[in-house]
């Protein structure tokens, strides 16, 4: 960055520092809030929406810890694998044609599904969708909702609406997840690599504002998980902070602030790390950055207490292993090849360092995908599952298993599987080797009750443009068009500037009474 420009940025950050130090920024509301229903009783206990964050913890409206014990109810993101006729179930993941709606609605009534979810003990659902689903106007075929005839004639989005209403009515917290652009199975080189593959960042953010507004009156829709497994396409890598069209840090920042200011100020904003960069070829740079870039460049939103970071871990992938077998496979170890200590170090380095209190990046970390098959017989894979669930239990982690629902005889990874008559099998029904580790994780001790508010630290960056996170300052308009400017979220003040460049540090820490008489009195009493 040129010296003259850097000086100008620092000048404006310094000006804001003086203003905020002297006067502060008063907390501001980001728009009307929907009425809050009575506390919901579920397998997760009683909790009061909306959710927010305090340090590394998610808390409810009363300030009590709300640990995300979740599972992924997939299907609405699409299941077609991208080759062959889309009408042939054999060309869908695990032979399961989801018809672009949550799986299982053809096999079991919603009431049965919800009862089974509650029996698992989970308190929240990550509910994937695709941008294509939002815009599809063709009703789902009757075969897609055989067990739920009340849903006949509805579009995929209208079925999604009904599922959201049923889940939240049963007491579950729902986190919306933009999983794919198209209704094609994720996650390779499939046209869904980035949020703006096949669509503009503007359109992607517009879709998010639409979805957030759609459920704004339902306070148990608690989060927006912005995009799933951001990764390289054939030609280009995503990045974290370069300021170009592939900058996931900037795109997430844009969408998050638009959601909170234009649609629903109550939502948690879930930002997943980068899932893959480089070419998976021995001798060439490649790997899984996950959340490592957050150490030096973390997000700050217009609400300093709405950010949750997310990461995915599967045994068949690795810190530098794509998970492929054959083409795209390298000699790098998979997570299941690591010793217990090596795995734990990788988890800490790639994600859980973010939960360290008192940092500019401190936030909850939600492992929103992990899983394994009930028919898995490999010793390494089974050991990995035991080790990683032990880590989640020991570190009081928020988590979401993938997937929740599948067809019997098709997807043995699903926690719950249903045959064509609606009969259930799976982790609740005995004989499933995963049950021991799952029960240990679900019943592990963790922090509960009231979480005291701590000191908040947040980073400002003007590397490539403005970062004005104060709604109060935004309302005053652009005070110097063309200059890069930054301002802390309302309720925080600027406390430090970078030695060079355009970084600032915000906090709600107070310096106390520093006037001369107070200093004198303090000296006299010590």
Image: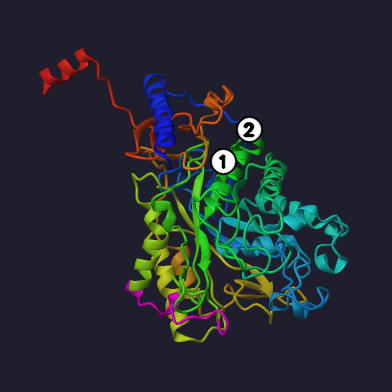
Q: Give the image location of residue 329, x and y in percent.
A: 52, 81
Image quarter hosting the C terminus: top left
Marks 1/2 in contact by CB < 8 Å: the verdict is: yes
Q: Residues within 10 Å of mark 2 (few under 14, many from 20)?
A: some
The chosen color scheme is rainbow
Residue range of the region highlighted in magenta in the rendering: 325-341
Disc 2 on helix, strand or loop?
A: loop
Q: Give the image location of residue 196, x and y in percent.
A: 66, 55
Q: Is residue 339 left or right of residue 309?
A: left
Residue 33 is tagged as: 2
Q: Which residue is mark 1?
A: 50
Is residue 393 among what the camera can see?
A: no
Disc 1 on helix, strand or loop?
A: loop
Residue 186 is drawn in which quadrant?
bottom right
Of callouts 1 and 2, which one flags the residue occurring earlier in the amino acid sequence? 2
Q: How many marks?
A: 2
Is residue 476 among what the camera can see?
A: yes
Is residue 108 covered in magenta? no
Type of secondary structure dominating the magenta stretch: loop
């Amino acid at each position: 960055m040129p010296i003259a420009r850097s000086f100008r940025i620092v000048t404006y950050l310094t000006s804001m520092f003086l203003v905020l130090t002297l006067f502060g920024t008063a907390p501001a509301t980001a728009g009307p809030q929907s009425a809050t229903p009575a506390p919901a009783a579920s397998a997760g206990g009683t909790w009061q929406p909306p959710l927010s964050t305090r340090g590394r913890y998610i808390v409810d409206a009363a300030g009590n810890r709300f640990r995300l014990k979740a599972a992924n109810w997939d299907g609405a993101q699409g299941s077609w694998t991208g080759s062959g006729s889309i009408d042939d179930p054999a060309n869908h993941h695990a032979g399961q044609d989801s018809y672009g709606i949550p799986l299982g609605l053809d096999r079991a009534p919603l009431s049965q599904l919800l009862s089974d979810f509650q029996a698992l003990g989970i308190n929240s659902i990550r509910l994937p969708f695709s941008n294509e689903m939002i815009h599809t106007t063709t009703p789902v075929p009757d075969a897609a909702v055989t067990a739920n005839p009340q849903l006949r004639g509805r579009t995929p989005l209208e079925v999604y609406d009904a599922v959201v209403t049923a889940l939240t009515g049963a007491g579950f917290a729902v986190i919306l997840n933009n999983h794919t652009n198209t209704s094609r199975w994720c996650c390779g080189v499939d046209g869904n690599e980035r949020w703006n593959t096949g669509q503009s960042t503007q359109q992607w953010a517009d879709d998010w504002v639409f979805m957030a507004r759609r459920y704004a009156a339902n306070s148990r829709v608690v989060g927006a998980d912005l995009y799933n497994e951001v990764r390289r396409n054939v030609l280009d890598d995503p990045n974290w902070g370069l300021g170009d069209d592939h900058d996931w840090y900037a795109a997430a920042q844009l969408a998050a602030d638009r959601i909170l200011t234009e649609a629903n100020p109550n939502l948690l904003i879930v930002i997943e790390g980068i899932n893959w960069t480089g070419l998976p070829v021995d001798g060439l740079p490649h790997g899984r950055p996950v959340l490592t870039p957050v150490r030096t460049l973390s997000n700050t939103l217009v609400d300093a207490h709405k950010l949750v970071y997310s990461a995915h871990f599967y045994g068949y992938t690795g810190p530098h292993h794509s998970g492929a077998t054959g083409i795209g496979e390298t000699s790098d170890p998979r997570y299941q090849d690591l010793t217990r200590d090596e795995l734990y170090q990788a988890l800490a380095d790639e994600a859980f360092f973010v939960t360290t209190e008192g940092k500019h990046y401190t936030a909850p970390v939600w492992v929103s995908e992990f899983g394994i098959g009930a028919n898995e017989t490999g010793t390494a894979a089974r050991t990995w599952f035991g080790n990683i669930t032990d880590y989640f239990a020991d570190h009081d982690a928020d988590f979401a298993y993938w997937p929740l629902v599948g067809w019997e005889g098709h997807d043995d990874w699903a926690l719950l599987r249903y045959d064509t008559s609606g009969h259930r099998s799976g982790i609740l029904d005995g004989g499933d080797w995963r049950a021991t580790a799952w029960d240990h994780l679900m019943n592990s001790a963790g922090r509960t009750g009231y979480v005291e508010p701590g000191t908040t630290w947040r980073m400002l960056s003007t590397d490539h443009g403005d970062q004005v996170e104060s709604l109060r300052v935004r309302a005053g308009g652009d005070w110097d068009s063309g200059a890069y400017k930054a301002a802390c979220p309302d309720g925080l003040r600027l406390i430090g500037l970078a030695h060079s460049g355009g970084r600032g540090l915000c906090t709600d820490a107070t310096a106390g009474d520093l006037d001369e008489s107070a200093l004198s009195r303090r000296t006299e009493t010590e």
